[in-house]
Image (cartoon, rainbow, N blue to C red):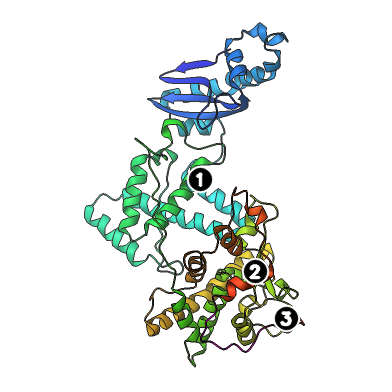
């Protein structure tokens, strides 16, 4: 049985969507609505393999009553027929005189989300409600960047456009207070075209946004448009992809922010009486020797994460704990090396019943406090990164030095200088080993982990502490 409807240049047809699927296997059945050569697809919630689809299309009404013919497809047919007759056809008919896909979406009650702004806001609220504050910030930043571009598009004067770009550049790093650049502009789903995305990329680049960040923004927008299994744009209206008449998200490339091991040792040897510089130096060195962990994970470390038997810090990255892809992710095991012990003794909490370092003191490590935790981490991070730049200037190394360099430096040295296996390195920093079948057989012992990390130690440094007291 075939389903087809036409009204005022709008056509509706039931199709089997074999895009990105093996056509022999089960593929989703969708309503393809076409208007002025643009098409959008609407889910039926049904799937059929090739054989059943051909039988479905070839069957008459009576065939769905006979087991020897298409009786097993009766429920599919009845559900599709009811939606077609009672909902889809009337909705197309009512919107036919002034048709738009947005109007049809609204009529079908596809969602209460009418604009891209609405979709972003709903996603941000969901992330905040599930305490995924970091992800929510990415979506909020992307939305703000899109709104600025939409506002720019509507400016008529070339002079005014240039002045707005200059204002965006001057206020690029303003995220709080009266100097934040706030503009208002609604973005419709129909606005998101290949030209929109290309022009948006040019605008963001003109305002000083790096291509790596542009790639993040575009992938975030694509995730909003995809909306899981129920995209807001589909068919010829879907703008992302490769090839003609599609927008390809820029890769941007990963900026190399790895230091030579000799520069790491220079930082470790840096002497100062300035407390701020001393803290920045020690935190940077601790992060490097602790498998290159990031600052947020360092702040979250607790004394209970230290395994006394192996003298290792055993923890999960915050990023890994949040993911749903793996129910029981393997922890990171970082050997407690002598410089790490010395740094804990200098800057760690003396009471060993909570956090190792004092940055989150007074804030319980629970999901409900994630916003407070994020704010406290950022408050602590800024002066450390500023101090690292002072240290870098005095040592004559990369003036952009920040805590972000520790992870890249650790991984780069293990892979490029020590030729440690990729699987081992990934396990040390908590990266997925993917589908590598040998990963499950690669389980380095605490002794091996300590042997590898000990080779990073500064040969000119004499360390005084080799283990923490056992009362933690």
Task: State whether residue 306 is above or below residue 213.
Answer: below
On residue 448, the disc is: 2
Q: Element at badge 2?
A: helix
Q: Which residue is mark 1?
A: 224
In magenta, the rendered stretch is 456-466
Q: Element at badge 3?
A: loop
How dense is the environment of label 1, judged by Cα within 10 Å: few (below 14), some, or many (20 and up)? Answer: some
Choose the circle earlier in sequence order: 3 or 2: 3
Task: State whether residue 92 is above or below residue 333.
Answer: above
Q: Element at badge 1?
A: helix
Q: How many marks?
A: 3
Specify whether 414 is left or right of 203.
right
Task: State whether residue 31 is above or below residue 286.
Answer: above
On residue 352, the disc is: 3
**Quadrant of the rendering where the N terminus is positioned:** top right
Image spot of residue 14 (x, y percent): 54, 20
Q: Check contact, mark 2 vs mark 1: CB within 8 A.
A: no
């Amino acid at each position: 049985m075939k389903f087809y409807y036409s009204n005022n240049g709008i056509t509706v047809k039931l199709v089997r969507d074999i895009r990105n699927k093996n056509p022999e296997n089960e593929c989703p059945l969708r309503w393809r609505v076409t208007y002025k050569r643009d098409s959008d697809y609407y889910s039926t919630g049904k799937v059929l393999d090739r054989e059943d689809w051909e039988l479905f299309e070839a069957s008459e009404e009576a065939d769905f009553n006979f087991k020897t013919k298409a009786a097993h497809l009766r429920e599919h047919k009845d559900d599709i027929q009811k939606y077609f007759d009672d909902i889809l056809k009337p909705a197309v008919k009512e919107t036919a005189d002034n048709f738009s896909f947005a109007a049809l979406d609204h009529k079908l009650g596809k969602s209460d989300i009418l604009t891209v702004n609405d979709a972003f806001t709903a996603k941000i609220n969901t992330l905040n409600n599930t305490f995924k504050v970091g992800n929510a910030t990415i979506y909020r930043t992307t939305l703000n960047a899109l709104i600025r571009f939409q506002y720019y598009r509507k400016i008529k004067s070339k002079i005014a456009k240039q002045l707005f770009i200059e204002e965006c550049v001057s206020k690029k790093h303003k995220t709080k207070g009266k100097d934040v650049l706030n503009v208002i502009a609604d973005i419709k789903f129909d606005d998101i075209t290949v030209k929109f995305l290309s022009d948006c990329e040019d605008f963001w680049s003109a305002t000083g946004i790096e291509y790596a960040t542009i790639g993040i923004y575009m992938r975030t927008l694509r995730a909003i448009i995809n909306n899981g299994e129920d995209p807001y744009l589909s068919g010829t209206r879907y703008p992302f992809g490769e090839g003609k008449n599609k927008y390809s998200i820029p890769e941007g490339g990963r900026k190399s922010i790895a230091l030579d091991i000799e520069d790491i040792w220079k930082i470790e040897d840096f002497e100062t009486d300035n407390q701020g510089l001393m803290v920045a130096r020690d935190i940077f060195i601790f992060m490097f020797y602790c498998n290159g962990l990031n600052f947020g994970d360092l702040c979250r470390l607790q004394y209970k994460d230290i395994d006394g038997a192996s003298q290792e810090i055993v923890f999960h990255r915050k990023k890994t704990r949040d993911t749903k892809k793996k129910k029981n992710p393997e922890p990171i095991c970082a050997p407690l090396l002598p410089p790490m012990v010395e740094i804990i003794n200098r800057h760690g909490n003396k009471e060993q019943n909570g956090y190792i370092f004092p940055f989150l003191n007074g804030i319980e490590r629970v999901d409900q406090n994630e916003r407070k935790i994020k704010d406290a981490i950022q408050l602590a991070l800024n002066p450390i990164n500023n101090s690292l730049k002072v240290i870098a200037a005095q040592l004559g190394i990369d003036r952009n030095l920040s805590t972000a360099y520790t992870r890249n430096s650790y991984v780069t040295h293990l892979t490029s200088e020590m030729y440690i296996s990729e699987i081992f390195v990934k396990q040390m920093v908590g990266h997925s080993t993917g589908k590598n079948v040998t990963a499950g057989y690669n389980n380095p012992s605490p002794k091996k982990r300590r042997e590898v990390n000990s080779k990073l130690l500064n040969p000119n440094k004499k360390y005084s502490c080799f283990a923490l007291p056992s009362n933690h």
